[in-house]
Image (spheres, rainbow, N blue to C red):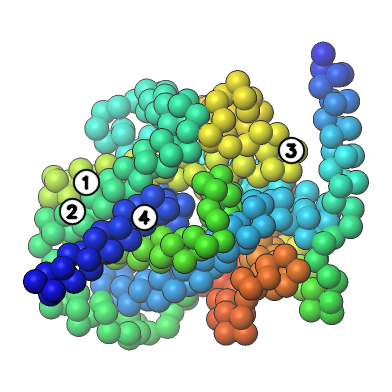
């Protein structure tokens, strides 16, 4: 009897913790899954097609990389109740504040264009014209915020995060060799051919897609908007850790799909990969296209919000998803203007879309190092962070991660500017 | 109306500049060094972008 009551008590305790987690989770999972945006899907699809399963182990390393960087935004947001944009203004003065804000606006808008490129190319596979996709996306994004409740927005976003897992059944459909995945994929080794410039480029691309500037701004603002308290930081960390696992799991399954079916094929974009997959396995290709649309959509939702939050914080406008449109007109105006203009660019005939896609990578590296360095410096400000200041070990780990990200993403940006540099 | 919009926003920008004129983070040698590194880094990147732009023309 005593054992039963103990078991029941344990069950109630665990169930209560799970329920609490579902209430407090959100920003971490959403930002991490949205990190697998249209550009990210293309990078993973191309990696699988070029190197097969050989770089899966490298993707696993990206779990702690993404976690340690994003976890800092949880602490900073929960303790200071400020978004990253406002925190930079307050911490380092107006010069660095304006630089970060304007750079963020440019990078986010260009990235938004790439999300629309991904969404329209995915829907074109199903015969949906780009104009209809664009209008549909505007409509869906309007619905997500029109209720004026953060909770509603977050739950819809989490639904789209769940759709992102479509790559998992997609991978099972192509019947990969589990033996090969375990022995070739998860054992750290150098792919055949050794350390070539090509391999270096793909490593840089994969790291570049793991941490983007908008992610820091988005998660910190989302933590503030959700009203996360200091005592809830451990839950925020679990949320971020689960999100970082999800993002890498999805990436691995994309690599498995293209590594199984399209091994050795040169892939320029995920839409093209979906069409190629359809020739071999109709459902796997369809899942790839659905996943691409979903990835672009999630990316667009988060990126446009990251800009609106940052501007709202600095300009002192009402800037919460808990506000109705008439209560926070400038916040929603920024959200819709960036969204609508980015969508319209894709509809312009002969628009330089490839140039925009390349330009994003270059502009992003002007903001990423600054945003990361500011993050570490702010987390070391004992006056504001108190007991949540970075420990010595956290500083060592995050500094190593930041240095590696800065060096590799800079080389990636420069190699985009000067393509022959690494050849 | 346009004039009013711009004058209102310029006033807002001036207000933000005043509000954040003094950085709240203590300017220790580490912080100063990091900010100096960022300045050099950005000058280098902007230089490369300009070089690419000029050579493309």
Question: Do residues under tags 2 and 4 come within 8 Å of each other at their CB atoms?
Answer: no
Mark 2 or 1 closer to N-term?
Answer: 2
Question: Do residues under tags 2 and 1 come within 8 Å of each other at their CB atoms?
Answer: yes
Query: Does A328 sit left or right of B48 as displayed?
Result: left
**Viewer-side residue, A142 vs A280:** A142
Residue wearing tag 1: A287
Disc assigned to residue A170? 2
C-alpha gap between disc 1 and disc 3? 43 Å
Please rate how many residues cluster around mark 1, counting C-alpha atoms within 10 Å: few if below 14, some from 14 to 19, many from 20. many
Residue wearing tag 3: A316
Mark 4 or 3 closer to N-term?
Answer: 4
Question: Do residues under tags 3 and 2 come within 8 Å of each other at their CB atoms?
Answer: no
- Tag 3, which secondary structure? loop
Residue A121 visible in image: yes
**Viewer-side residue, A38 vs A349:** A38
C-alpha gap between disc 2 and disc 1? 6 Å
Marks 2/1 same chain = yes
**Quarter containing the N terminus of chain A:** bottom left
């Amino acid at each position: 009897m005593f054992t039963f009551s103990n078991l029941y008590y344990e069950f109630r305790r665990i169930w209560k913790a799970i329920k609490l987690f579902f209430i407090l989770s959100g920003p971490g999972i959403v930002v991490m899954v949205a990190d697998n945006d249209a550009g990210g899907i293309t990078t993973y699809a191309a990696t699988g097609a070029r190197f097969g399963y050989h770089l899966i182990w490298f993707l696993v390393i990206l779990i702690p990389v993404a976690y340690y960087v994003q976890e800092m935004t949880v602490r900073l947001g929960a303790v200071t109740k400020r978004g990253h944009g406002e925190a930079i203004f307050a911490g380092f003065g107006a010069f660095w504040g304006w630089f970060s804000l304007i750079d963020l606006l440019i990078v986010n808008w260009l990235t938004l264009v790439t999300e629309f490129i991904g969404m329209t190319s995915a829907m074109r596979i199903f015969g949906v014209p780009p104009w209809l996709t664009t209008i549909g996306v505007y409509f869906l994004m309007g619905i997500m915020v029109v209720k004026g409740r953060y909770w509603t927005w977050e739950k819809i976003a989490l639904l789209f995060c769940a759709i992102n897992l479509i790559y998992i059944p997609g991978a099972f459909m192509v019947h990969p060799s589990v033996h090969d995945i375990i022995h070739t994929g998860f054992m750290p080794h150098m792919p055949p051919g050794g350390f070539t410039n090509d391999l270096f480029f793909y490593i840089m691309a994969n790291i570049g897609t793991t941490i983007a500037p908008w992610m820091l701004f988005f998660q910190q603002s989302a933590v503030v908007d959700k009203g996360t308290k200091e005592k809830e930081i451990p839950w925020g960390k679990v949320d971020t850790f689960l999100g970082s696992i999800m993002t890498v799991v999805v990436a691995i399954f994309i690599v498995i799909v293209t590594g199984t079916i399209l091994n050795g094929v040169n892939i320029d974009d995920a839409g093209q990969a979906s069409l190629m997959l359809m020739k071999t396995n109709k459902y796997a290709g369809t899942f790839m296209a659905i996943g691409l649309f979903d990835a672009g959509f999630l990316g667009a939702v988060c990126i446009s919000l990251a800009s609106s939050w940052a501007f709202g914080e600095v300009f002192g406008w009402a800037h919460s998803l808990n506000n109705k449109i008439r209560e926070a007109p400038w916040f929603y105006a920024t959200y819709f203007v960036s969204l609508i203009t980015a969508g319209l660019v894709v509809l312009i005939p002969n628009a330089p879309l490839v140039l925009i896609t390349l330009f994003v990578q270059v502009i992003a590296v002007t903001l990423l190092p600054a945003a990361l360095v500011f993050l570490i410096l702010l987390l070391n400000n004992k006056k504001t962070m108190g007991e949540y200041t970075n420990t010595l070990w956290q500083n060592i780990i995050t500094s190593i991660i930041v240095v590696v990200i800065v060096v590799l993403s800079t080389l990636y940006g420069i190699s985009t500017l000067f393509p022959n540099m690494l050849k | 109306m346009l004039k009013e919009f711009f004058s209102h926003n310029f006033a807002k920008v001036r207000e933000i500049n005043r509000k954040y004129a003094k950085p709240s983070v203590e300017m220790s040698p580490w912080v100063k060094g990091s900010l100096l590194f960022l300045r050099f880094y950005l000058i280098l990147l902007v230089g490369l972008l300009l070089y690419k732009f000029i050579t493309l023309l």
